[in-house]
Image (tube, rainbow, N blue to C red):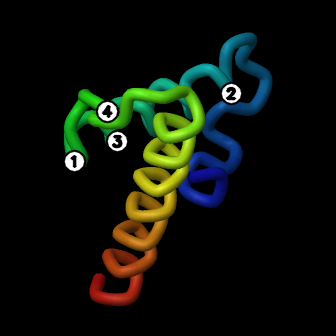
Amino acid sequence: MSKRLKGSQKGKTYGQRAQAETTNSMLKRNLGDALRARSPRARREEQLLRVLVHNIALLCDEIEG
């Protein structure tokens, strides 16, 4: 995401927040917004797995397009 938004957020007060909100929105839209794990550790692991899947999907999109 930093490469895609490079320079567009420069000098803006909430530039990093905009990137985080965009990423969270993409994760929720593409992978759903509910976690199924019940324990805190399992929820964290599920979140990390979703981030990994999200990043792989972005890489695949860049390779194809």
Identify the disc placed on residue 16: 2
Residue 49 picture location, percent across and down: 47, 56
Lateral position of residue 37 relative to residue 44, left or right: left
Query: For the residues marked 4 and 3, what is the alpha-carbon distance in whole angstroms?
Result: 12 Å
Q: Identify the residue position indicated by label 3 in the image.
A: 27
26 sits left or right of 43 in the view: left
Please provide percent x and percent y for residue 46.
Answer: 44, 46
Which of the 4 image quarters holds residue 44? top right
Which residue of the protein is positioned furthest toward the top in this rendering?
Answer: 13
Q: Is label 1 in contact with label 3 (beta carbons under 8 Å)?
A: yes
Q: Which residue is pictured at 24% across the width and 47% down the height?
A: 31
Which badge, 4 or 1, comes first in the chain's sequence? 1
Q: Earlier in the sequence, mark 1 or mark 2?
A: 2
Pick whichever of labels 4 and 3 is earlier in the sequence.
3
Residue 55 located left or right of residue 31: right
Instruction: Give the structural element (helix, strand or loop) at label 3.
Output: helix
Q: Amino acid at mark 2?
A: Gln
Name the N-terminal-most of marks 2 and 4. 2
Q: Residue 35 bears which disc, if any?
A: 4
